């Protein structure tokens, strides 16, 4: 499981908070690309087929943020130590 | 758990909370609105309010689409579902939203064909599988969700699927923020900006808040440390007399948003002249309807939609809570007539609603402890 899934948010494909909410998104790892769809896996290993129309260049190994079955962001791998800066 | 733990590390959280207490000028009272229902949920879930000084008040904003949907629109959707040709599809939480005619779930129990879907694309698949029926998708959500609906409509048009329509209730966050800023009750000092809406629209659309209203906006992630860092950034701005848009959630939010998603929305949707928001009234150019080119897939063009206005239950004070005038437990119905099991107002229906979040994470704990 690539560690960078956990960098973005704690939601999963199975339990992503309020399903109707306008602001929930799930970080996932692309394991297969089939045309405009991709099979993705979340940090708990759950899989789903999602639409990647907004990211035609998507590749296996990319990290996508998924909302309601559609990828809305492609995410960079985090830098070492990220998450600890900017507190003080 | 790497990364998630870092954003929930007690030491880092305490360090951030100390910084907030250091920055909070005891002679001032800070009122910060978190616009997004996801943030409200995180604040209660992690008990962040307890870490903050008394003079830093978090006000819960309008960023839950279920909470701002007027009852009349729920009833309009239910009337569509009563057509025996129609299969009405909706997201899970939408199934529990009460209109005057009851909830979609209650209607389903009475034999009306209403089905829950995870994605609008699932509704489109349902239409493909049921060519003799009319599948209507009850679309709801801000700019995080609208691209999913837009993409589904693009596919429906391209595939030429004639029995799929969308009943659009999509709303835009920026006009709602402007309405709150223009309200005579407005006493906010700054905003925690929505995280994933901003993934789509970027940070630039919030610049008017800083420029025209001299209020800072910090776009924030959803982990405890994200929110506390955002409050640190807001307090620094306020103490230095700055009003700028800053991006705490840089690891996810591009400053200019997602151009492909915005293009899909622009292709499919146009702004409605007016749309009614629960608690906020009619706001001009605040919601999305389908463009005339998509009329064959527009439920409002294909079917008769009554557009009846329904007054909210008088005793429920959702509007005051939405605007930050009242806190959830100050509503007369809170925890008595109105609970997550039997919600009266929309803010109790959605788990992201301020009242449901407060009920689940604070009120239940108080009931157990007897406080």
Image (cartoon, grey):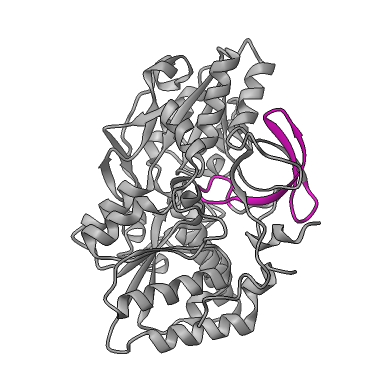
Q: Can the viewer see residue B86 in this picture?
A: no
Quarter of the figure with residue A70: top right
What residue lies at 28% left-to-right and 61% top-to-bottom? B210
Residue A69 lies left or right of residue B276; in this view the side is: right
Residue B52 vs residue B334, the one in the foreground: B52
Please determine whether, in this image, residue B251 is positioned above or below residue B237: above
Please determine whether, in this image, residue B305 is positioned above or below residue B227: above
What residue lies at 64% left-to-right and 12% top-to-bottom? B131
Percent position of residue B311, x then y: 31, 42
Quarter of the figure with residue A9: bottom right
Residue B237 vs residue B175, the one in the foreground: B237
Q: Is residue B24 magenta?
A: no
Percent position of residue B270, x then y: 36, 29
Which contiguous range is marked in magenta? A18-46
Percent position of residue B328, x then y: 41, 65
Q: Is residue A33 magenta?
A: yes
Please determine whether, in this image, residue B219 is positioned above or below residue B89: below
Residue B323 vs residue B330, the one in the foreground: B323
């Amino acid at each position: 499981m690539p560690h960078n899934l956990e960098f973005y948010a704690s939601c999963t494909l199975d339990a992503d908070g309020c399903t109707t909410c306008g602001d929930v998104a799930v970080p996932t790892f692309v394991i297969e690309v089939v045309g405009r769809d991709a099979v993705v896996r979340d940090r708990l290993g759950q899989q789903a087929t999602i639409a990647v129309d907004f990211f035609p260049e998507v590749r296996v190994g990319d990290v996508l943020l998924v909302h309601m079955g559609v990828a809305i962001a492609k995410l960079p791998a985090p830098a070492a130590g990220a998450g600890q800066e900017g507190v003080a | 758990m790497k990364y998630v733990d870092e954003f929930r590390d007690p030491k880092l959280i305490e360090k951030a909370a100390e910084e907030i207490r250091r920055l909070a000028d005891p002679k001032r009272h800070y009122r910060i609105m978190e616009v997004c229902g996801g943030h409200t949920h995180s604040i209660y879930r992690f008990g962040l309010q307890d870490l903050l000084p008394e003079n830093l008040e978090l006000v819960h904003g309008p960023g839950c689409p279920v909470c701002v949907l007027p009852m009349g629109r729920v009833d309009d959707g239910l009337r569509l579902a009563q057509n025996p040709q129609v299969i009405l599809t909706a997201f899970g939480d939408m199934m529990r939203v009460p209109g005057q005619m009851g909830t979609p779930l209650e209607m389903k129990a009475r034999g009306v064909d209403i089905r829950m879907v995870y994605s609008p694309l699932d509704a489109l698949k349902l239409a493909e599988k049921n060519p003799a029926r009319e599948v209507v998708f009850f679309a709801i959500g801000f700019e995080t969700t609208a691209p999913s609906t837009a993409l589904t409509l693009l596919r429906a048009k391209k595939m030429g699927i004639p029995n799929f329509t969308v009943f659009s209730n999509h709303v835009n966050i920026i006009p709602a923020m402007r309405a709150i800023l223009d309200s005579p009750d407005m006493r906010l000092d700054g905003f925690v900006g929505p995280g994933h809406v901003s993934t789509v629209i970027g940070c630039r659309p919030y610049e008017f808040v800083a420029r025209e209203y001299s209020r800072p906006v910090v776009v924030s992630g959803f982990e405890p440390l994200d929110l506390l860092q955002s409050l640190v950034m807001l307090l620094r701005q306020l103490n230095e007399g700055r009003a700028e848009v800053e991006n705490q959630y840089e690891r996810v939010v591009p400053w200019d948003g997602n151009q492909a998603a915005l293009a899909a929305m622009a292709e499919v949707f146009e702004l409605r002249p007016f749309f009614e928001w629960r608690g906020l009234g009619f706001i001009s150019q605040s919601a999305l309807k389908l463009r005339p080119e998509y009329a064959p897939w527009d439920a409002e063009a294909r079917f008769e939609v009554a557009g009846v206005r329904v007054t909210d239950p008088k005793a429920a004070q959702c509007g005051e809570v939405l605007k930050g005038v009242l806190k959830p437990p100050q509503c007369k119905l809170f925890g008595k007539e109105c609970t997550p099991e039997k919600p009266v107002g929309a803010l109790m229906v959605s788990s992201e609603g301020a009242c449901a979040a407060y009920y689940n994470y604070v009120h239940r704990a108080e009931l157990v402890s007897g406080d």
